[in-house]
Image: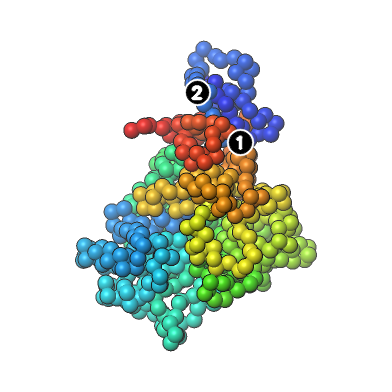
Amino acid sequence: MSKIYTNALIHTEDPKNPQADTVVIDNGIFTYVGKAEGYTAKEDDEIIDLGGKFVIPGLIDSHQHWSLPSTSVGKHANPMPVIITQTIEEALAQMDEFVKANPGFDRYKLMAGKKEDWGRTLNRYDLDKICSDKPMVVIDMGAHSYTGNSKLLEILNVTKDTPDPVPGFVYYQRDENGEPTGLGAEFVQVEAQNVVNTVPYDDIIDNIDEIVQYNISRGITGAYDAGFMFDDVKFLDSLKKYEEEGRLSQRVSLSYCVFLPERAKDAVKKQREYKDKYESDLITLDTIKIFMDGTITEASAGLTRPYTNGKTGQGGCLLTMDELYKLFSEANEAGFNVHMHTIGDATAKLIIDTLKKMEADGIELKVKFIIAHLQLILDDYIPELGEHNIYLNLTPFWANFNEALYNSSDITVLPEGMRSNRFNSYWKTGAVCAFSSDVTVLPSFAGDGYLKPFVGMEVGMRRLAVGEMDEKWVDDEAEKLTLDQLLTGFTINGAKQCSWEKETGSIEVGKSADMVVLDRNLYEIPAETIHEVEPLITVFRGKEVYKYSAE
């Protein structure tokens, strides 16, 4: 018996057959895509009339975070409350309340947002007043820094004499006397989290289930998890068990993560071990993740010119050219793609120069070198993006300019004259541009916010925050994306990044029957309402894994 979805407006992402009104599914595969009159239904076929609804391929969110929240947020044990306040005094009061309410905990972990409004940086002495005898960590909402109390620094043996792992990028903030303030930038936070993380297996599996259920409710049938930060094996064991229980209703691509220079030395070996043990029908491990630099907010992204607005230095890059050349060469030979967090223009330049050197040395680039985010790049290097097997992973939501954002540290610390998030210019180079949300996919912890792909689509088209209607905040009209570009980036191009393009990413005969029925036609509504779009049905491998309910 075949399943037939008909009377629909189907956007296929197949250039040879861009629109259809009917699909036929057998054993989880599209066996017909076309006009209703081109297929004769059999007596026992199941026919679903979609009443003219708009249908797109299953969405691919090609840069999410699964392992990070799954292994750090306890649902029943080791909770991590999120504190968002306008003042540091309010934040400290809430932290104190949490600690006093949980005297039996042997460690405390919290997350704080809106810190740019506080007027000063949280430090260990603030936390010591709340808790001095047990380790306490406050993670920044952006997950690129933390502040610990003195007990934590004692456990980690962080002192005045402790060297910074990567000066200007991965470092311990110090006071005028050289003493650590308790703030750690970038991936020194991993050692801190390892002290306070005690998330049990059952909670990890519950977190994975929340991620999967959320994704399919948003029409996402495939995702890339951007690197293991801690508890690699614990997460992988949990995900494998979840899949073996028949509960994994989407594809996921996973990566060993290089976030400190020493992890580059055995990255290929570790990824191969994980691939051999955990790869399956729905779980792929063919990519290595590198955090090449930090963020503009922390002044840790690698820039070619100094930061402004009171920030110091030019940030930094995790690896030198020699170290990057070695890792690129090893991954290229082993057949592993490389996915790189890249914010600053100096970092993008280093990556491109390394690839050019490899080619000049006669090395054939056989894998995908995926530059993620690419917030800043030198003009002369933009044409290079269409060469050297470079793929781009971009976050359209980051183009959400309005007055509040313009006055935040994310913008004003940039060197004068720099333009950011030049998505349309990147697209025009011919590089495969995949779009993503770059989110911690755990709504019960982080909220819904901008997790929805349709929010990213709207912002990518308008270059304004959701709800912002004043066009004066459009920073760069020429960098607006079209709906066609955004749909391609969230479907077939995401599949290409994850090496799934032969099985998904478009609605074509012979491919996995992955598609989403939407409540409205994206091409017939105002751009400023796209964030409101809701999936009605998500189909994965021919099964309706999600169906909208108004309750």
Q: From the image, state whether disc 2 or disc 1 is nearer to you.
A: 2
Q: Can residue 76 be seen at all in this image of the molecule?
A: yes
- Tell me residue 362's x, y (percent): 78, 63
Look at 48% across and 31% down and name the residue there.
519
- Image position of 85 with respect to 486: above or below: below
Q: Nearer the viewer, residue 461 or 271?
A: 461
Please state which amino acid type lies under the numbered disc 1: Ser
Farthest top residue?
43
Q: Nearer the viewer, residue 503 or 369?
A: 369
Mark positioned earlier in the residue sequence (2 or 1) = 2
- Tell me residue 117's x, y (percent): 41, 65
Name the residue that disc number 2 marks: 50
Name the residue that disc number 1 marks: 506
Look at 58% across and 28% down and name the residue there.
10
User: Which label sits on residue 127?
Assistant: none
Crowdedness near tag 2: few (<14), some (14–19) or many (≥20) residues, C-alpha within 10 Å: some
